[in-house]
Image (cartoon, rainbow, N blue to C red):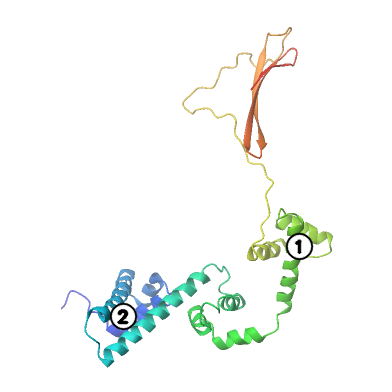
Amino acid sequence: MPSSKPPYPAEFRQQIVELAGAGRGLKQLAREFGVSANSIRNWVHGDRDRVQLTVRSVAENAPLSASERAELHELRRRLKQVQTERDILAKATAWQEREDVHHVSELVKANQADFPVRTMCRALRVSPSGYYDWLDRAPSARAQANAELTQRNSDIHRASDANYGAPRIQAELRDAGVVAGHNRIARLMRRHGLRGVSRRRGRCVTTRRERDQRAAPDLVQRCFEARDINQLWVADMTYIPTWAGFGYLAVVLDVFSRKVVSRR
């Protein structure tokens, strides 16, 4: 009995390579067809090298026969198709809602000047007839409401000098009598590149003791009282946020007079 498995048929390997070129993941293909991901990767690389070798032979060798020229033309066509579908899928990865047919159709419409419509539909697994039906279909009530809400969001965002985020835009809409959820407003803002400015102050730590060092001794035993000046001084430091970053202020006070002895 042979100890190794028989080689996969050439037709089967070619089908796997075409599926990988159309954007299917190697791990997904390995699970579906029971082939290791490394084998599929080697098949894809081998197919790519074969195409390049065939193209190179045109410039180096004698004129090809009619059948060889036809095969070369087919390989070039298929390579161009795989590269185009790869570029389409690379653009589609930026769309978080790719599973929504409406947003896939929007992606096709936005890139129809760069790629053929039928190629995009095949790569994104939607039918060309369905895309053209969507193109001729009137916008739904939800789409119209989203377009109106997006315009309101843009107006409020522009009026605030691009400072307002979703919470404050929602408050402005509520004051105007418009009811819209926070998640919906945030989703529409994110889709159209609108972003607010956070006013939250960052936390700044001014006292950080080394772990291997003991704490400073309490020389006054928590008794902050003095009967005359220059008997007890205390010190503290704080930070002041500025446009250039945090500024630090250290102050030494006389406990009796409450006057500043020194500052830096």
Give the quadrant of the C terminus: top right
Disc 1 secondary structure class = helix
Residue at the spot 72% in from the left edge and 10% down from the top edge: 226
Horizontal relation, residue 133 to residue 67: left or right: right
| Number of marks | 2
Q: Closer to the camera, 189 or 19? A: 189
Q: Closer to the camera, 115 or 184? A: 115
Residue at the spot 83% in from the left edge and 59% down from the top edge: 175
Mark 1 against mark 2, which lies toward the viewer? 1
Q: Quadrant of residue 23?
A: bottom left
Q: Is residue 185 above or below residue 68?
A: above
Q: Closer to the camera, 30 or 240? A: 240
Residue 155's label in the rendered image is 1
**Residue closest to the far left:** 1
Q: Is residue 256 above or below residue 59?
A: above
Q: Quadrant of residue 194?
A: bottom right
Q: Which kind of residue does numbered mark 1 sit on?
A: Asp
In space, the residues marked 1 and 2 are separated at their CA atoms by 55 Å
Mark 1 or 2, nearer chain start: 2
Residue at the spot 59% in from the left edge and 84% down from the top edge: 131
Q: Is residue 138 above or below residue 162?
A: below
Q: Which residue is mark 2?
A: 13
Disc 2 secondary structure class = helix
Q: Which kind of residue does numbered mark 2 sit on?
A: Arg
Percent coordinates x, y for residue 108 in the rendering: 56, 78
Percent coordinates x, y for residue 252 in the rendering: 66, 18
**Residue closest to the far bottom:** 66
Q: Residues within 10 Å of mark 1 (few under 14, many from 20)?
A: few
Q: Quadrant of residue 136?
A: bottom right
